[in-house]
Image (tube, helix red, strand yellow):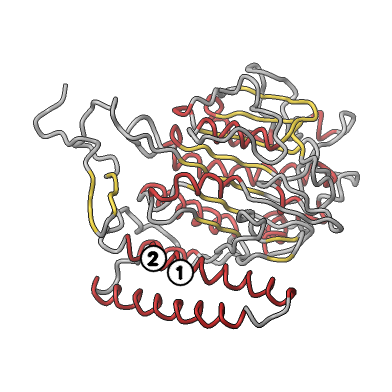
Amino acid sequence: MNKSWHIKRRTFLKGAGVSLALPFLEAMSEDVKDKPAVKRACYFFFANGISLPPEDNQAFKDGWTWFPLEKGDKYKLTKPLSPFAPFREKMTVLSGMCHHASPLNHTCGDVWLTAGNASPLSYYNSISVDQVIADKIGHLTREPFLTLSCDGGVGTLSRVSTISFNRDGKPIPSENSPRRIFDRLFNADKGSKESRRKKLQYKGRMIDMILEDSRSFNRKLGRSDREKMDEYLESVSSLEKKVERSEAWLDTAVKKVDTSKLELDVNIKTAPAEYYHTMFDLISLVLEADITRTVTFMMSREDGMGIADTFPTTVFGYNGHHAMSHEGGHVGGYLKWAKYDQWLSARMSYFVKLLENKKDFEGTYLDNTIVTYGSGSSSTHKQHNCPFVVLGGGNMGLKHGRHINVEDGNAADIYLTQMQAMGINVENFADSKGTVSGWT
């Protein structure tokens, strides 16, 4: 029964034209029938595929292959997936999924969340699923989305360092510094409100001047130059929207969360596990503070690019991750690769545990967050039979505890199913053929 001191879940903070639903508090009513559902989505990508030794290889015989051998709810976790054992009933392993539109090597990061075409001769990428979600629910939070990676920026064509792409298929820059992420998201209230307002207004005036001059100049250019200027104007307009958004949220304080245990100056080169854990700590706190509900994290880049390629060397003394993926046929090659797969799974499991241990209004944060972990290729860099593990989202209707195999399936079907589970009204996504049968 409701007590006299219970707070209605529909209580809102209001200011500067913004209404923001309060986060879950112990004093809130136990009656959850009329509560607005909080639904989140996080996507985590690793490069170079997974170790899939042939059946006559000793690594396979000893259980060191990524995909479970059994299908359905009777499946057993393999050794590379064993760190997920505590969450077996809240997770689904999917196999057989493919990126049919872009079947070439090393473009995996470009298309993992877009299911677009990243072939060198006809590169035509499209919007990533996280951005579709952010378009629908991003207005509910201070930040519409958060895009992270180990390297930052956007990288290069087919060797990107971000997995988020806008509606025009352009890469969205990622952030890789824990300290910069923390300062931007959790130190936004530093300084007086009036001084921050003046800074934002000044930025707004500067942007207006740039846009006015640039548009006037643009009319004097030829077609090719106008296309380049249009891209520039689009980026400036995006900055203008960010300033306007910051002004709108100026009077709403960031929810206080415990950030005292963050290791913001962790050395990624010498302590990769600690770096991953710090990034996961940050993401979990961002979700807890309801700063955003959509997050992507590129944990490594394709083709030996970026700092994460050195992690197997730092941790195990192996060759780089990309080189290791070509050494499966060598003596012990598949086993070494599989042990690194297990190490990555353990890092991901750390994040899942953070969400499972946070109490949400109904269930845990994991129950209200869809966590997708995987790669854009299988063994030998083929964009067929891509590995996917999806955890959480039980309160959105995802039925877990199974290994689902869809022969020659579409990776886009996974994303379509997830968006519909989140209540996002979309009938198709990229080259999807429909939702994943029996998953919801």
- Label 1: few (<14), some (14–19) or many (≥20) C-alpha neighbours in 10 Å: some
Quarter of the rendering occupied by the N terminus: top left
Q: Position of residue 330 (x, y in %)?
A: 90, 47
**Looking at the image, which residue sits at the far front?**
219
Amino acid type, mark 1: Glu
- Going 45% across and 62% down the picture, which residue do you hit? 263
- Compared across the picture, whether 345 is left or right of 322 comes to left
What distance separates the C-alpha of mark 1 from that of mark 2?
A: 6 Å
> Pointer 2: what residue?
244
Residue corresponding to mark 1: 240
331 sits to left or right of 169:
right
The picture places residue 199, in percent across and down from the top left corner, at 34, 77
- Which residue is outermost to the left? 4
Callouts 1 and 2 close, C-beta under 8 Å: yes
Provide the secondary structure element on which disc 1 rests: helix
**Where, by quadrant of the figure, is residue 250 drawn?**
bottom left
Q: Amino acid at mark 2?
A: Glu
User: Viewer-proximal residue, 142 or 124?
Assistant: 124
Quarter of the image for the C terminus: give it: top right
Within the image, what quadrant is residue 332 found in? Answer: top right
Rendering quarter of residue 154: bottom right
Q: In the image, 27: left or right of 337?
A: left
**Relative vertical location of residue 436 with respect to residue 431 in this rendering, above or below:** above
Q: Is residue 321 above or below residue 56?
A: below
Residue at the spot 42% in from the left edge and 63% down from the top edge: 182
- Categorize mark 2 by other alpha carbons within 10 Å: few (<14), some (14-19), many (20+): some
Spot occupied by residue 283 in the image (x, y as percentages of width and height): 47, 52
Q: Please count the marks in the image.
A: 2
Secondary element at tag 2: helix
At 80% from the left edge and 40% from the top edge, which residue is drawn?
A: 100
Relative to 86, residue 194 above or below: below
Residue 204 versus residue 211: which sits nearer the camera? 211
